[in-house]
Amino acid sequence: MNVAQVVRLMASLAWLAAIAVIAISVMRAGRGQPIRKSGTVVLAIVGIAILLTLVAAGLVFIQPEERGVVISALAPKGYREETLQPGLRWVVPFFETVVLYPISRQTYTMSIAPLEGAIQGDDSVTARTSDGQELFIDASVIYAIDPNEVIGVHIAWKNRYTDELIRPQSRGIIRNAASQYGVEEIVSTQRDAFQSSMETAMAEKLEENGLVLVDFILRNITFSPEYAASVEQKQIAEQLAQQAELIVQQRKQEAEQARQTAQGRADALVIDAEGKAKSNLIEAEAQAKALELLGAALRSNPALLNYEYIQRLAPGIQVMLVPNDNPYLLPLPTLTPGGSVPPASGE
Protein backbone atom coordinates (compact mmCIF):
# COMPACT_ATOMS: atom_id res chain seq x y z
CA MET A 1 0.00 0.00 0.00
CA ASN A 2 1.50 3.37 -1.07
CA VAL A 3 1.20 6.82 0.50
CA ALA A 4 -1.63 7.96 -1.76
CA GLN A 5 -3.73 4.95 -0.80
CA VAL A 6 -3.04 5.52 2.89
CA VAL A 7 -4.21 9.14 2.61
CA ARG A 8 -7.38 8.03 0.82
CA LEU A 9 -8.06 5.52 3.57
CA MET A 10 -7.57 8.18 6.23
CA ALA A 11 -9.94 10.54 4.39
CA SER A 12 -12.59 7.82 4.24
CA LEU A 13 -12.20 7.10 7.94
CA ALA A 14 -12.48 10.84 8.71
CA TRP A 15 -15.77 11.06 6.82
CA LEU A 16 -17.09 7.99 8.62
CA ALA A 17 -16.10 9.53 11.93
CA ALA A 18 -17.87 12.80 11.02
CA ILE A 19 -21.03 10.93 10.03
CA ALA A 20 -20.90 8.90 13.25
CA VAL A 21 -20.55 12.03 15.42
CA ILE A 22 -23.45 13.71 13.62
CA ALA A 23 -25.66 10.61 14.08
CA ILE A 24 -24.84 10.34 17.78
CA SER A 25 -25.54 14.08 18.25
CA VAL A 26 -28.93 13.78 16.57
CA MET A 27 -29.89 10.72 18.66
CA ARG A 28 -28.91 12.37 21.96
CA ALA A 29 -30.66 15.59 20.97
CA GLY A 30 -33.85 13.58 20.34
CA ARG A 31 -33.62 12.20 23.88
CA GLY A 32 -33.00 15.65 25.32
CA GLN A 33 -29.34 14.89 26.01
CA PRO A 34 -27.41 17.22 23.67
CA ILE A 35 -23.63 16.85 23.49
CA ARG A 36 -21.69 19.89 24.50
CA LYS A 37 -19.74 21.50 21.71
CA SER A 38 -20.95 18.80 19.28
CA GLY A 39 -21.04 21.33 16.46
CA THR A 40 -17.41 22.19 16.99
CA VAL A 41 -16.43 18.52 17.01
CA VAL A 42 -18.38 17.83 13.85
CA LEU A 43 -16.88 20.81 12.08
CA ALA A 44 -13.36 19.80 13.08
CA ILE A 45 -13.82 16.23 11.87
CA VAL A 46 -15.43 17.38 8.63
CA GLY A 47 -12.58 19.84 8.08
CA ILE A 48 -10.01 17.08 8.56
CA ALA A 49 -11.97 14.81 6.20
CA ILE A 50 -12.12 17.53 3.53
CA LEU A 51 -8.40 18.24 3.86
CA LEU A 52 -7.53 14.54 3.61
CA THR A 53 -9.85 14.17 0.64
CA LEU A 54 -8.15 17.04 -1.18
CA VAL A 55 -4.70 15.60 -0.45
CA ALA A 56 -5.80 12.13 -1.53
CA ALA A 57 -7.26 13.50 -4.75
CA GLY A 58 -3.98 15.23 -5.59
CA LEU A 59 -1.52 12.46 -4.73
CA VAL A 60 -0.67 9.83 -7.32
CA PHE A 61 1.88 7.06 -6.90
CA ILE A 62 3.39 5.82 -10.16
CA GLN A 63 4.82 2.28 -10.13
CA PRO A 64 8.22 1.65 -11.79
CA GLU A 65 6.54 -0.27 -14.66
CA GLU A 66 4.01 2.50 -15.29
CA ARG A 67 3.76 5.96 -16.78
CA GLY A 68 0.96 8.43 -16.13
CA VAL A 69 -0.87 10.64 -18.61
CA VAL A 70 -2.33 13.71 -16.88
CA ILE A 71 -5.71 14.82 -18.23
CA SER A 72 -5.91 18.48 -17.18
CA ALA A 73 -8.67 21.05 -17.37
CA LEU A 74 -6.03 23.69 -16.79
CA ALA A 75 -3.77 22.79 -19.74
CA PRO A 76 -4.39 24.36 -23.20
CA LYS A 77 -4.42 20.96 -24.97
CA GLY A 78 -6.41 19.22 -22.26
CA TYR A 79 -3.42 17.19 -21.08
CA ARG A 80 0.07 17.71 -19.79
CA GLU A 81 2.69 17.29 -22.48
CA GLU A 82 4.95 15.25 -20.21
CA THR A 83 4.11 11.94 -18.60
CA LEU A 84 4.34 11.33 -14.89
CA GLN A 85 7.44 9.32 -14.00
CA PRO A 86 7.62 6.64 -11.27
CA GLY A 87 7.26 7.84 -7.70
CA LEU A 88 4.83 9.93 -5.63
CA ARG A 89 3.43 12.76 -7.78
CA TRP A 90 1.04 15.65 -7.28
CA VAL A 91 -1.78 16.84 -9.52
CA VAL A 92 -4.40 19.54 -9.04
CA PRO A 93 -7.34 17.90 -7.20
CA PHE A 94 -10.58 17.64 -9.19
CA PHE A 95 -9.04 19.53 -12.13
CA GLU A 96 -6.57 16.87 -13.19
CA THR A 97 -6.84 13.11 -13.42
CA VAL A 98 -4.18 10.52 -14.22
CA VAL A 99 -4.48 7.59 -16.66
CA LEU A 100 -1.89 4.90 -16.03
CA TYR A 101 -0.27 2.86 -18.83
CA PRO A 102 2.05 -0.15 -18.41
CA ILE A 103 5.40 0.03 -20.17
CA SER A 104 6.34 -3.54 -19.22
CA ARG A 105 6.22 -6.30 -21.81
CA GLN A 106 2.85 -7.68 -22.79
CA THR A 107 2.00 -10.81 -24.79
CA TYR A 108 -0.88 -11.36 -27.17
CA THR A 109 -1.31 -15.00 -28.22
CA MET A 110 -3.45 -16.44 -31.00
CA SER A 111 -3.74 -20.21 -30.70
CA ILE A 112 -5.79 -23.12 -32.00
CA ALA A 113 -5.82 -24.53 -28.45
CA PRO A 114 -8.98 -23.32 -26.66
CA LEU A 115 -7.25 -22.24 -23.42
CA GLU A 116 -3.95 -20.83 -24.70
CA GLY A 117 -4.92 -17.70 -26.57
CA ALA A 118 -6.15 -14.29 -25.47
CA ILE A 119 -9.58 -15.24 -26.83
CA GLN A 120 -11.18 -18.48 -25.71
CA GLY A 121 -11.64 -21.13 -28.39
CA ASP A 122 -9.85 -21.53 -31.70
CA ASP A 123 -8.15 -18.20 -32.34
CA SER A 124 -5.51 -19.40 -34.84
CA VAL A 125 -4.97 -17.40 -38.03
CA THR A 126 -6.35 -19.03 -41.17
CA ALA A 127 -4.18 -18.23 -44.19
CA ARG A 128 -3.58 -19.46 -47.73
CA THR A 129 -0.22 -19.99 -49.36
CA SER A 130 0.74 -18.96 -52.88
CA ASP A 131 -0.14 -22.46 -54.11
CA GLY A 132 -3.60 -22.37 -52.55
CA GLN A 133 -3.00 -24.54 -49.48
CA GLU A 134 -4.84 -23.62 -46.28
CA LEU A 135 -2.82 -23.15 -43.10
CA PHE A 136 -3.78 -22.56 -39.48
CA ILE A 137 -1.04 -20.54 -37.76
CA ASP A 138 -0.48 -20.00 -34.04
CA ALA A 139 1.56 -16.96 -33.08
CA SER A 140 2.44 -14.74 -30.13
CA VAL A 141 3.29 -11.05 -30.24
CA ILE A 142 5.44 -9.77 -27.37
CA TYR A 143 5.37 -5.98 -27.28
CA ALA A 144 5.57 -2.93 -25.01
CA ILE A 145 4.51 0.68 -25.06
CA ASP A 146 7.39 3.01 -25.90
CA PRO A 147 7.92 5.09 -22.70
CA ASN A 148 8.49 8.16 -24.88
CA GLU A 149 5.24 7.65 -26.81
CA VAL A 150 2.75 7.02 -23.99
CA ILE A 151 0.84 10.26 -24.62
CA GLY A 152 0.56 9.49 -28.34
CA VAL A 153 -0.75 5.99 -27.58
CA HIS A 154 -3.32 7.49 -25.24
CA ILE A 155 -4.51 9.99 -27.84
CA ALA A 156 -4.65 7.44 -30.67
CA TRP A 157 -5.78 4.30 -28.91
CA LYS A 158 -6.31 4.88 -25.17
CA ASN A 159 -6.63 1.34 -23.76
CA ARG A 160 -7.85 -0.21 -27.03
CA TYR A 161 -4.44 -0.86 -28.59
CA THR A 162 -4.52 -4.60 -27.82
CA ASP A 163 -7.86 -5.38 -29.45
CA GLU A 164 -7.82 -2.74 -32.19
CA LEU A 165 -4.12 -2.63 -33.12
CA ILE A 166 -2.18 -5.73 -32.07
CA ARG A 167 -4.79 -8.30 -32.98
CA PRO A 168 -5.93 -7.09 -36.43
CA GLN A 169 -2.46 -6.01 -37.58
CA SER A 170 -0.81 -9.30 -36.62
CA ARG A 171 -3.51 -11.41 -38.27
CA GLY A 172 -3.35 -9.36 -41.45
CA ILE A 173 0.45 -9.49 -41.58
CA ILE A 174 0.43 -13.28 -41.10
CA ARG A 175 -2.05 -13.78 -43.94
CA ASN A 176 -0.14 -11.46 -46.25
CA ALA A 177 3.20 -13.16 -45.50
CA ALA A 178 1.75 -16.65 -46.05
CA SER A 179 0.50 -15.67 -49.49
CA GLN A 180 4.09 -14.96 -50.58
CA TYR A 181 5.33 -18.53 -50.06
CA GLY A 182 4.40 -22.02 -51.13
CA VAL A 183 3.40 -24.51 -48.46
CA GLU A 184 6.54 -26.60 -48.99
CA GLU A 185 8.69 -23.49 -48.51
CA ILE A 186 6.92 -22.49 -45.31
CA VAL A 187 7.37 -25.90 -43.67
CA SER A 188 10.94 -26.47 -44.84
CA THR A 189 13.45 -24.20 -46.57
CA GLN A 190 11.80 -20.78 -46.11
CA ARG A 191 10.35 -21.05 -42.61
CA ASP A 192 12.91 -18.64 -41.13
CA ALA A 193 12.40 -16.18 -43.98
CA PHE A 194 8.62 -16.47 -43.51
CA GLN A 195 8.90 -15.64 -39.81
CA SER A 196 11.42 -12.86 -40.43
CA SER A 197 9.14 -11.14 -42.95
CA MET A 198 6.25 -11.14 -40.46
CA GLU A 199 8.48 -9.86 -37.67
CA THR A 200 9.78 -6.99 -39.80
CA ALA A 201 6.31 -5.92 -40.94
CA MET A 202 4.92 -6.13 -37.40
CA ALA A 203 7.77 -4.06 -35.96
CA GLU A 204 7.14 -1.31 -38.51
CA LYS A 205 3.40 -1.17 -37.76
CA LEU A 206 3.92 -1.03 -34.00
CA GLU A 207 6.61 1.63 -34.27
CA GLU A 208 4.22 3.80 -36.28
CA ASN A 209 1.75 3.63 -33.38
CA GLY A 210 4.08 4.19 -30.44
CA LEU A 211 4.73 0.56 -29.51
CA VAL A 212 7.87 -1.59 -29.60
CA LEU A 213 7.95 -5.16 -30.88
CA VAL A 214 10.04 -7.30 -28.54
CA ASP A 215 9.53 -10.63 -30.32
CA PHE A 216 7.27 -12.33 -32.81
CA ILE A 217 6.92 -16.05 -32.14
CA LEU A 218 5.64 -18.45 -34.78
CA ARG A 219 4.29 -21.08 -32.40
CA ASN A 220 2.77 -23.70 -34.67
CA ILE A 221 1.55 -24.39 -38.21
CA THR A 222 -1.36 -26.77 -38.76
CA PHE A 223 -2.39 -28.03 -42.19
CA SER A 224 -5.76 -28.92 -43.61
CA PRO A 225 -6.68 -32.61 -43.15
CA GLU A 226 -6.29 -33.29 -46.88
CA TYR A 227 -2.80 -31.82 -47.07
CA ALA A 228 -1.76 -33.45 -43.81
CA ALA A 229 -2.81 -36.83 -45.24
CA SER A 230 -0.86 -36.20 -48.46
CA VAL A 231 2.23 -35.17 -46.47
CA GLU A 232 1.97 -38.32 -44.39
CA GLN A 233 1.69 -40.47 -47.52
CA LYS A 234 4.68 -38.69 -49.03
CA GLN A 235 6.73 -39.26 -45.90
CA ILE A 236 5.78 -42.93 -45.89
CA ALA A 237 6.79 -43.22 -49.55
CA GLU A 238 10.10 -41.47 -48.85
CA GLN A 239 10.77 -43.76 -45.90
CA LEU A 240 10.02 -46.82 -48.02
CA ALA A 241 12.31 -45.50 -50.77
CA GLN A 242 15.07 -44.88 -48.25
CA GLN A 243 14.56 -48.35 -46.82
CA ALA A 244 14.74 -49.87 -50.33
CA GLU A 245 17.90 -47.89 -51.03
CA LEU A 246 19.43 -49.13 -47.79
CA ILE A 247 18.56 -52.70 -48.77
CA VAL A 248 20.17 -52.19 -52.19
CA GLN A 249 23.28 -50.76 -50.54
CA GLN A 250 23.33 -53.69 -48.15
CA ARG A 251 23.05 -56.16 -51.03
CA LYS A 252 25.86 -54.35 -52.86
CA GLN A 253 28.03 -54.52 -49.78
CA GLU A 254 27.27 -58.23 -49.34
CA ALA A 255 28.05 -58.87 -53.03
CA GLU A 256 31.28 -56.91 -52.78
CA GLN A 257 32.19 -58.81 -49.63
CA ALA A 258 31.47 -62.15 -51.39
CA ARG A 259 33.50 -61.02 -54.41
CA GLN A 260 36.41 -60.06 -52.23
CA THR A 261 36.16 -63.36 -50.36
CA ALA A 262 36.12 -65.32 -53.65
CA GLN A 263 38.99 -63.23 -54.96
CA GLY A 264 40.91 -63.97 -51.81
CA ARG A 265 40.28 -67.68 -52.17
CA ALA A 266 41.29 -67.59 -55.84
CA ASP A 267 44.44 -65.68 -54.97
CA ALA A 268 45.19 -68.25 -52.27
CA LEU A 269 44.70 -71.12 -54.73
CA VAL A 270 46.95 -69.42 -57.26
CA ILE A 271 49.61 -68.87 -54.63
CA ASP A 272 49.28 -72.47 -53.47
CA ALA A 273 49.49 -73.76 -57.07
CA GLU A 274 52.50 -71.59 -57.76
CA GLY A 275 54.12 -72.90 -54.60
CA LYS A 276 53.44 -76.49 -55.53
CA ALA A 277 54.73 -75.91 -59.08
CA LYS A 278 57.90 -74.35 -57.74
CA SER A 279 58.27 -77.23 -55.28
CA ASN A 280 57.80 -79.82 -58.05
CA LEU A 281 60.27 -77.99 -60.25
CA ILE A 282 62.87 -77.92 -57.51
CA GLU A 283 62.25 -81.61 -56.77
CA ALA A 284 62.53 -82.53 -60.48
CA GLU A 285 65.70 -80.51 -60.80
CA ALA A 286 67.08 -82.25 -57.73
CA GLN A 287 66.16 -85.69 -59.09
CA ALA A 288 67.68 -84.85 -62.49
CA LYS A 289 70.84 -83.68 -60.76
CA ALA A 290 70.91 -86.87 -58.70
CA LEU A 291 70.46 -89.08 -61.76
CA GLU A 292 73.14 -87.14 -63.57
CA LEU A 293 75.53 -87.70 -60.69
CA LEU A 294 74.51 -91.37 -60.46
CA GLY A 295 75.10 -91.88 -64.20
CA ALA A 296 78.50 -90.31 -63.92
CA ALA A 297 79.33 -92.55 -61.01
CA LEU A 298 78.23 -95.67 -62.88
CA ARG A 299 80.21 -94.71 -65.93
CA SER A 300 83.30 -94.34 -63.88
CA ASN A 301 82.66 -97.45 -61.74
CA PRO A 302 80.33 -100.10 -63.28
CA ALA A 303 80.64 -102.40 -60.25
CA LEU A 304 78.84 -99.81 -58.15
CA LEU A 305 75.53 -101.00 -59.52
CA ASN A 306 76.16 -104.56 -58.31
CA TYR A 307 77.16 -103.25 -54.95
CA GLU A 308 74.02 -101.16 -54.57
CA TYR A 309 71.85 -104.07 -55.66
CA ILE A 310 73.46 -106.40 -53.11
CA GLN A 311 73.18 -103.76 -50.40
CA ARG A 312 69.44 -103.46 -50.93
CA LEU A 313 68.84 -107.22 -50.63
CA ALA A 314 67.70 -108.51 -47.31
CA PRO A 315 70.74 -109.05 -45.11
CA GLY A 316 69.77 -112.68 -44.32
CA ILE A 317 69.80 -113.94 -47.93
CA GLN A 318 72.75 -116.22 -48.67
CA VAL A 319 71.49 -118.28 -51.66
CA MET A 320 69.57 -117.13 -54.73
CA LEU A 321 67.76 -119.46 -57.11
CA VAL A 322 67.13 -118.14 -60.60
CA PRO A 323 65.54 -119.84 -63.61
CA ASN A 324 68.03 -121.60 -65.85
CA ASP A 325 66.50 -120.26 -69.02
CA ASN A 326 66.67 -116.52 -68.11
CA PRO A 327 69.62 -114.28 -68.40
CA TYR A 328 71.24 -112.85 -65.28
CA LEU A 329 70.44 -109.30 -64.41
CA LEU A 330 73.84 -108.84 -62.90
CA PRO A 331 77.08 -110.19 -64.18
CA LEU A 332 78.32 -113.07 -62.11
CA PRO A 333 81.92 -113.51 -61.22
CA THR A 334 83.89 -115.36 -63.81
CA LEU A 335 85.01 -118.85 -62.83
CA THR A 336 88.50 -119.58 -63.94
CA PRO A 337 89.82 -123.11 -64.27
CA GLY A 338 90.98 -124.36 -61.01
CA GLY A 339 89.40 -121.42 -59.34
CA SER A 340 86.77 -121.45 -56.65
CA VAL A 341 83.74 -119.43 -55.82
CA PRO A 342 84.38 -116.90 -53.12
CA PRO A 343 82.85 -118.02 -49.87
CA ALA A 344 79.66 -116.39 -48.78
CA SER A 345 79.92 -113.91 -45.99
CA GLY A 346 79.56 -115.43 -42.62
CA GLU A 347 80.96 -118.82 -43.57
Image: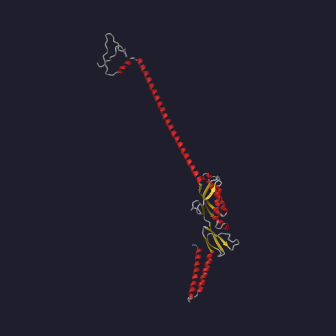
Quarter in which the N terminus is drawn: bottom right
What colouring style does the render use?
A: secondary structure
Image quadrant occupied by the C terminus: top left
Of residues 125 and 79, which is closer to you in this image?
Answer: 125
- The residue most toward the left is 347
Residue beneath the point at 45% across and 25% down: 284
- Which residue is found at the position 57% from the left and 84% from the top? 23
**Farthest-out residue, top:** 337
Quadrant hosting residue 60 = bottom right
The residue lying at 47 percent from left, 30 percent from top is 273
The image position of residue 20, as x and y in percent, is 57, 82
> Where, by quadrant of the figure, is residue 325 drawn?
top left
Q: Is residue 192 left or right of residue 330?
A: right
Residue 68 vs 132, above or below: the answer is below
Residue 248 locus on image (x, y percent): 54, 42
Work out which residue is located at the far front of the displayed protein and give it.
Answer: 226
Q: Where is residue 156? Give x, y as percent.
A: 67, 66
In the displayed structure, 182 sits above or below 59; it is above
